Structures are given as structure tokens and as C-alpha cells.
Image (cartoon, rainbow, N blue to C red):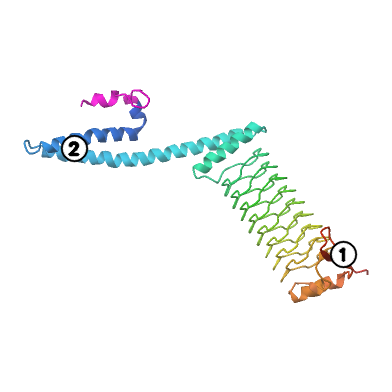
Amino acid sequence: LPVRYFFNCSTMSRGRKISIKSILKFPNFFFVVATLIVGPLLYYLDSLQTQWDWSQVLVEGHGMFFDLIVFGILLTIYETRKKKWDRIEQYENEIDDFRPWKADEGVYRIVGNVKRLNKEGISKIDLHDCHLVDADLKNKDLREAALVDANLERANLEGAKLQHANLERAKLTGSRLSKAILDHANLSNAKMAEVQLMESELRHAIMFKAQMQKANMDQAQLEEANLRDANLIEANLRCANLSKAILSESKLKSAVLKEANLTKAQLISADLRKADLRDAIFFQADMADVELEGAKVDNRYWLENLSGAQVKHADLLKNRFYVDREVQTDEIGIIYFEIKIKQV
């Protein structure tokens, strides 16, 4: 068949003609077409070799054929990767364009680009200063993402991967982060009042001076997290793992720490007034200068038991506080004892 046939034949699906211009637009397609032409031609010439001596022509022809295959494969790989890089750059540029837009449509467009970047295997996304109020980022991959000063109020980040992400000064008030992974994330000075962090993973996370009033961190994993000077007033830390966590100078007034694990935690100068400490583990914790007035405990000998748990500065606490022997009951009828300060 003449070569012209291959460039003018109509496609079966759409009935459009394939032009030389369209082939040159996609070099990998050109190599496929060239291979399909040269291959059968060489086969035909090979079959004639018994009659004519075409050896030199065939040697060159076979060399060209293999060049087409090799360079075709390499060019296809390069073109595929280049297209991917171009798409990634386009999505990132669009996010940058929508960054100052404080409207719902801007939120949808940014989230859409985050989804597309995730499909391309990209999680380290620059979302600093982005307006993402009420954004649906459930189960999204945002590892190492830059979310500094981002507004994520009431956003859905359940199950999101945020390891090593930078959320410094981010607004997360009322957002949902249950079962999210935030290991090694930076949440310093973040506004996180009433945030939902049930069963979330925050190992080694930095939450220095984070505003986490009434945050729900039931069963959260906070091993070695830095919560120094964090505002955790009325926060729910029931069954949370806070082993080796830094809670020095943190505000935990009226917080629920029932059944929490505070093994080797640093609680120096922490405010635990009126906190629920029933069945919490304080083994080898440092409780120097802790405020305990009004805290709820599960037995009358709670302060004495601190020495047995090797709590640092336990004797100083016994000198300042005592457990009231009057039995009290909470709203669901479970008994507790209240810690009171000794009168000088």
C-alpha cells in the first residue's frame, strides 16, 4: 500500500482524517506509524533476498528499524513524563491564582486541584494563605503540605494524611480531623477550638501555644507531642496516649484526662484545676508546680500513689494538696474524689 494511504485513512471511531501535522504533534505516534511501515517493508525485502543481494540495504534497514523502536520507546517515556510535569505545574499555578479568592467557588477549585495533584502522586502542595472554609479534604494526601495561615475552619479532613505538614497559625476551628494522620506536623499557634481529633495520630506533632479549647481528642495518639503552653481548657483527652508528651505550662482546666496515658510526660507548671484525672496513668511523669485544685480522682490515696508511680515532685504535691474524703458522683453516677488545696 502507498505511504499516502496511512496518512489519509479515516478513523473508524470518529471519521476524522489523520494528517501529517497531527502525527508530528505527537512524536511517539509518529514512531509507531514509522515502525508499522518499515517493519513490513523489511520483511518483504527479506523474502526477496534469495533472488537479489540486498544485504547492505537490509543491514541498514534493520539498523533503522531498531533505532525507531529504541528512540520511540525513549521518546514516549520522555513525552509521558513531560506531560505529567506540565499538568502538575498547571494545577499548582491554578492554586496560586485562586489563593487570594475568598469565595466558595475558589474553595471548590482549589480542592479540585488538590485532588488532581494527588492523582499525579503529589502531596507536598503549597496551600499557604488559602481560603478553605468548609472544604472537603477527606482522606486527601497532604503529606509535607504547606498550610501556614490557611483558613480551614469547619473543613472535613477526616482520614487525611498530614504527616510533616506545616499548619502553623492555621485556622482549624470546628474542623473534622478524626482518624487523620498528623505525625510530626507543625500546629504551633494554630486556632483549633472545638476541633474533632478522635483517634487521630499526632506523634511528635508540635502544638506549641495551640488554641484547642473544647477540642475532642478522644483516643488520640500524642506520644512525644509538644503541647507546651497550649490552651486545652475543657478539652477531651479521654484514653489519649500522651506518653513522653510535653505539656509544661499548658492550660488543662476542666479537661477530661480520664484513662489517659501520661507516662513520662512533662507537666511542669501545667494547670489541671477541675480536670478529670480518674484512672489516668502518670508513671514517672514530671509534675513540678502543677495546679490540681478541684481535680477529680478515683480514690482517696491518689496523691500518695504518685510516689509509688515514681512521679517527680510527688512529695511537693502532697505538701500543697489533699484529697477530700467526701465521696461525690458525676452526672452519670460514677463516684470521684476532689483534690483541694491545703490552707496555709
Name the residue tied to disc 2. Answer: 61
Above or below, comparing residue 89 to residue 3 in the picture: below
Instruction: Decide if residue 24 is on the left or right side of residue 128.
Output: left
* 113 shown above or below 217: above
Residue at the image position 50 percent from the left and 45 percent from the top:
121
Where in the figure is residue 205, as x and y percent of width and height? 65, 56
Horizontal placement of 317 versus 172: left or right?
A: right
Q: Main secondary structure of the magenta part?
A: loop
Q: Is residue 17 left or right of residue 269?
A: left
| Residue 17 spot, x, y in % from top left | 33, 23
- Examine the image and state in which quarter residue 247 appears: bottom right
Name the residue: 87% across, 64% down.
Answer: 328
What residue is pinned by disc 1?
328
Dot placed on the residue nearer the N-terminal end, 2 or 1: 2
Q: Is residue 20 magenta?
A: yes
The part of the chain drawn in magenta is: 1-21
Label 2 to label 1: alpha-carbon separation: 96 Å
In which quadrant of the rendered view does residue 134 lie? top right
